[in-house]
Image (spheres, rainbow, N blue to C red):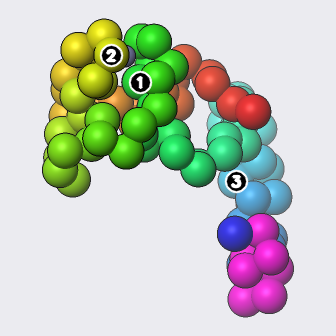
Amino acid sequence: MNAYMRASNLGHIPRQIEWNAARRGVQATKVKGAYSSQQCHMCYYVDKKNRPDQQTFCCRVCGHCTHADMMDISYLSLGDSW
Ligand SMILES: [Zn+2]
């Protein structure tokens, strides 16, 4: 993704997000996107089968189920970054 953004002249976007967040007094944190949509934020289990469809997240280990968009928001709000 980083190579694509640099090649397509979009490499300035992360810096703009950082600058805009600092201006507003919030923290911008880089998060690796790989597998984050398949990872349970309760037990951190990662499995493609945790997403039976586009809207549903249901962890196969702990049973935590929610709307997939809510899972992404919860994941990001926990500040999980690598
Ligand atoms: Zn789980």
Residue span colored magenta: 2-8
Characterize the local packing of mark 3: few (<14), some (14-19) or many (20 or more) Cα atoms within 10 angstroms.
some
Residue carrying label 2: 61
- Residue 28 position, x and y percent, is 70, 38
Amino acid type at image mark 1: Cys
68 sits left or right of 21 in the view: left
Ligand 1: quadrant of the figure: top left
Residue carrying label 3: 17
Q: Quadrant of the C terminus?
A: top right
Element class at badge 2: loop
Marks 3 and 2 sit apart, C-alpha to C-alpha, by 35 Å
Among the 4 quarters of the image, the one containing residue 32: top right
| Label whose residue precedes the other's in the sequence (1 or 3) | 3
Marks 1 and 3 sit apart, C-alpha to C-alpha, by 26 Å
Q: Are marks 1 and 2 in contact (CB under 8 Å)?
A: yes
Which of the numbered marks, if any, corresponds to residue 40? 1
Q: Nearer the viewer, mark 3 or mark 2?
A: 2
- Residue 34 position, x and y percent, is 59, 50
